Image (tube, rainbow, N blue to C red):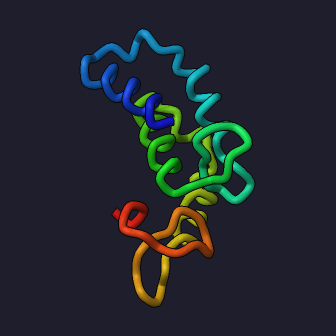
């Protein structure tokens, strides 16, 4: 999904998103949302805060962000935060780290 984001962003910057089948790409990106609300990087993988960012950003660029359950995604991300000490982990109940917090 990082590669997808980079490609979509490059096309967006150059005004070339018309070359993309936005419905097909949007469908594949929306399929990344799992029951917990988070987004994964590819099928059969666990959701992750950073993949959630890459997928969400791509969906925004192709105007398909309304195809996911935003409330569930927000809950997933908030469940990844350490409310006592600060920071964000890759998924709920994991240790926070600088990469995912940033």
> How many callouts does the rendering have?
0
Front residue of 24 and 64:
24
User: Residue 5 or 25: which is nearer the viewer?
Assistant: 5
In percent of width and height, residue 2 lies at: 45, 37
Q: Is residue 61 found left or right of 49 in the rendered image?
A: left
User: Which residue is drawn at the image coordinates 65% and 46% (left, top)?
Assistant: 33
Q: Residue at x 65, y 56 (%)?
A: 37
Q: Is residue 9 above or below residue 38?
A: above
Q: Is residue 9 left or right of residue 23?
A: left
Quadrant assignment, res 68 = top right
Image vertical order of residue 32 relative to residue 82, above or below: above
User: For the view shown, which residue lies furthest in the left direction?
Assistant: 14
Horizontal and vertical percent position of residue 14: 25, 18
The image position of residue 34, as x and y in percent, is 70, 50
- Position of the C terminus by quadrant: bottom left
Residue 98 falls left or right of residue 33: left
Picture residue at 40% right of the left edge, 12% below the top: 18
Q: Is residue 32 above or below residue 69?
A: above
Residue 41 appears in which quarter of the rendering? top right
Residue most toward the bottom? Answer: 84
- x and y, in percent, of residue 94 in the image: 58, 72
Q: Does 58 appear above or below 11?
A: below
Instruction: Name which residue lies at 51% across and 48% down.
Output: 51
Q: Is residue 54 left or right of residue 68?
A: left
């Amino acid at each position: 999904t990082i590669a997808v984001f980079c490609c979509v962003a490059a096309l967006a910057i150059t005004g070339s998103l018309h070359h993309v089948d936005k419905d097909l790409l949007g469908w594949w990106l929306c399929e990344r949302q799992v029951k917990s609300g988070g987004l994964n990087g590819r099928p059969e993988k666990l959701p992750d805060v950073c993949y959630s960012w890459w997928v969400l950003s791509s969906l925004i660029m192709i105007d398909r962000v309304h195809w996911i359950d935003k409330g569930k995604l927000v809950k997933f991300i908030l469940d990844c935060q350490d409310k006592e000490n600060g920071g964000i982990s890759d998924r709920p109940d994991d240790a926070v780290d600088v990469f995912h917090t940033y």
